[in-house]
Structure formats: C-alpha cells, structure tokens
Image (cartoon, rainbow, N blue to C red):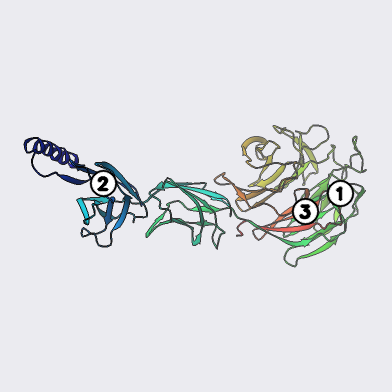
Amino acid sequence: MQRSWLLLLMMALVLFSSCEEDDPETTILVTEEVLLTSGEQARLLGRLITNQSINPSDHGFQLSEDQNFGSPIIIALGPKEGPGRFIGEVTGLKVGQTYYARAYMDLGSGLEFGNTIELNTLDPGLESFEPNFGKEGAEVFIFGRNFTQDTKVFFGDQEAVVQEVLFETRLRVIIPSASSASTVPLRVLVQDRELIFDNPFEYQIGTYEIASEYPANVRMFDNISFQRGGEFFAGLGSDKAAVFFPDIYKYNPGSNSWLQVPFNGTNRSFAWATENYLGGGIRELGRDPFLINRNFYRFDGSSFVQLDDLPFDSRESIAFEVGDFLYVVGGKEGNSKAGWRYESSTGIWAQIAEAPFAIDQSQASFTYQAEQYFINANGAIVKYIPFSDTWEAAGFFPGSTGQGYPIAQVVGDRVYVGAYRRSLEMWEWNLNSRVWTAKNNVPGIPQTLNAGSFESDGFVYFLRVPEITVVGDQPSPLYKFDPSGI
C-alpha cells in the first residue's frame, strides 16, 4: 500500500513538473517502510524526493510509543547530499511493543517530517536447549527467537552467566551451582517477559565424604570383601603384593567402627567371598604358574568353617549367591567362561551354562532380582538367569572401563558402576528404565584401586587403596557416596 501511494505521488510530481515548469520547486520526505523488526531491533527505509538541490544538515528517523512522538528515540544519520533513499537501524527497543516511526530532516529552518508508519517489535520465544543434563560450570545452549542482549537465564532460582547472545536466536550460558534440587525449571527472562521450558534441566549430582579409614596399616591388594546384613567385611590378599595379609576386619556404619574377625584359614590372594562363603585364590605369592588354593569355607557370621575343597581351580573368579545356591563364574585359571553351582543342602557342585565372554574380577558384576549382571571391558552387559540356566544380552555401559576392577553396587532399583582403575567416573543405571546417568566423579587420584563396596541406608560405601606406584604412607579411605547429594 505504501509503495502504491509512493508511485502515484511520483507520477503526479513528474506530470506537475512537465506541465507547470514555472511552478515552485517541490521536496517530499517519505517514511517508506519497515525493512526488519525483531525483539529489540528495527530497520527503517526512508526517501527524500526533490527536484532541487538540497543538502540537509541532518536526517534520520524518530520512533515513539505514542503518535505524538513525546520523548522520541532518535536515529540520527547526519548530513545528506541530495535526494535518495536512506536506512536507519535502532536497537534496545522493548519486545512485543507497538512503535510509531517517521523520517525527518533538518534544512536549517527547523525539522521537517515525513509520514508516520506503525511497527511492532516481536515477542520472544523458546524452542529447545541442550544438553538437558550437566554439572556446574559446563555450557548449555538455549535456542529460541528474539532474545535481547540483556536476556537473563535462571536454573531454578540460580542465575546463570550468559556468555553470548548470537543472532537473537541462541544463548550460550554457564550452568550455575545447584541450590537444593537436582531437577529444576529452566527460566529465560527477556526484559519483562519470563519464559519457562516445559522440560526441566537435570543436574549431575552425587557427593562423597570419607566415612572412615581401614584400620590396619597396610596397602591391601587382591583382597576379599563382602557384605553380610548391615556390616562390611574386607581383608586377606597381600600388603603391596609383597607379603600375605592374614587379617579380616568388619565395619559397622551405624557405630562407624571396625572390628577384627578371626580367620584360621590359609592365606590367599585373588580369592572370592560372599555373604556365606569364601574360597579360591593363590596360596603363594609369585608369578604364573600360580599355586592355587582350593580351600573352601562357610561363614556363619562369626567364624569360618572349612568345607571340602573346591573341585576346580579358581583365581579371580566372581562369586554370588541366589537363594540356597552359590555360583562361582569365570576366573583366570582354566576356562574363563565356565561356571559352577554349589547347593548348600547337599554340598554338591555342578557346572552351569558357559558365559558368552570370559569373566573375571576385573569386570563389574552385581545381583538384581535374582539375576547376575556382568559388564566386560568393552561395555557389553550380559545377565545370567539361574532359574533357567541361561545367559542374555542386557545392554551397554556408556562410561570408561579404565583398567578394570570397578565397584558395582545396587541400591533399590539403581546400580552404581564406576571408580574403575585409572578412571574416576561414576554412573547410575536405572534398572527399570534402563537409562544410564553420569554422576559426579569420584574424588582423589585415578591411581587407586577398590578393595570392596557395600550399601547401607541408600548410601554406597567403597574402600580405596592407592596403587603401588603412589609413594608415601597413604591411608585407605572408606568413602561414603550419596547418589542424591548436591
């Protein structure tokens, strides 16, 4: 409509000039159109039409929220030589606001104005953000439209640092510290407009504290550990792989105390233990070929009773109990895919179906709903189903498996896997949804080994031992991990 009006005006001016050559010279200032609007920006096109030689000392546009142009925003473009089009741009406008605009010029006798046109800045909007999960200090990108330079972002009630506003469509922000919740709404404040994403942001969480230290002055390697009721047992193995460590201690998280447990059996490293049984390992420290210890014990809660020897060699095997049966699978002696089942009521051992890959204590393993899960070095997960004596693929572990020997501890319907040798990652696997979620890293140095783990009151406890390459007299801390800690 504006262009049609302008065309007719120009035609009339040409006809008027040709028919009435003696008439006064004519000058017309036109506010032509709005070239662009966004949330806080506008770009305007004006035109000076004249049949005479004029040179305004200033020209440009005025913008105002009212048609009377009280206290207008001035877009001053400076002097202009002769007729023609001109473009002005303004920023810092209010989002979603109606403005009135007109061109102006100064010929020395006061300002002259063109016609008034109306424009509307655009409303801001949200589209998406990524990632939707992360930890303090990491970056999040927010995508949308008509973001202003003063846009603010809040994770819950915590304001984030907006690093960059790109093309009014993307925000680069730094995740602030969490306050009191791990899942928070993501709010974007564009001037006086508050926008909230439908889906929340989830913080990477998990806190650690040292609950205790192993009571013996020993750097315990290749030991046994197990949980019985609310108590944790750890011992045997060797001191720095040089001499056997003959003792076992139990830890009570309620009293935060350790107590030595009598063990009259033979020394061993690379053995296995469960709530009720202990066996396998080597009986002399040295290199391959190892001298295997086939002694087998039942534990009644206070003492170890020796049973008939194992009918197979076992070094670094994984043992677990389901119902009245003990299972011993894999190891680094003989067939690493083979497994055995022991029936407590009869004392009879029987072989079970072979695993789909070699299994040993360097792998994560845990029991959930009477099924045993194993995670190999490549992250592949399989489970053994005792009821049917079968194996099934069960998923994939997304984290680093480092150099093996992690913890894998079940808490309710979650399992926590991590703290591999030379890796500080910790992961949570929701065993209902089958979704893996990264937790905050384990504190300390990656040159650390695990000497056992257990669960108590929703917390995961795990005993850490410095590698032999770590110099100095180093303690063995027992960490308490709160998966929901912020």
User: Could you say where residue 168 lies in the image, as x and y percent from the top left?
Assistant: 41, 47
Q: Looking at this rendering, what residue extends furthest in the left direction?
A: 19
Residue type indicated by callout 3: Arg
Precedes in sequence: disc 2 or disc 1: 2
Is residue 244 visible in the rendered image? The answer is: yes
Residue 77: x and y, percent? 32, 49
Point out the tag, 3 or 2, that comes first from the N-terminus: 2
Q: Given the image, on which type of amino acid does mark 1 rest?
A: Gly
Give the residue number, with chain letter if any, for mark 3.
464
Q: How many marks?
A: 3
How far apart are the two marked residues, 3 and 2, measured between alpha carbons? 83 Å
Residue 78 position, x and y percent, is 32, 50
Q: Which residue in the protein does label 1 denote?
A: 237
Of badges 3 and 1, the one in the foreground is: 3
Amino acid type at image mark 2: Asn
In three-dimensional space, the C-alpha distance between marks 2 and 1, rounded to whole angstroms, equals: 96 Å
Q: Residue 25 versus residue 357: which sits nearer the camera?
A: 25
* Residue drawn at the location 61% of the way across and 38% of the way down: 394
Category of crowding for the residue at label 1, using alpha-carbon neighbours closer than 10 angstroms: few (below 14), some (14–19), many (at least 20) = many
Quadrant of the rendered image containing residue 352 = top right
Disc 1 on helix, strand or loop?
Answer: loop
Who's the residue at 12% across and 36% down the image?
A: 14
- Residue receiving disc 2: 55
Check disc 2: other Cα within 10 Å, few if <14, some if 14-19, many if 20+.
some
For mark 3, does the 10 Å Cα neighbourhood hold few (<14), some (14 to 19), or many (20 or more) residues? many
Indicate the secondary structure of the residue bearing disc 3.
strand
Q: Quadrant of the image for the N terminus?
A: top left
Work out how far the residue at label 3 is from the one at label 1, CA to CA, in angstroms.
Answer: 14 Å
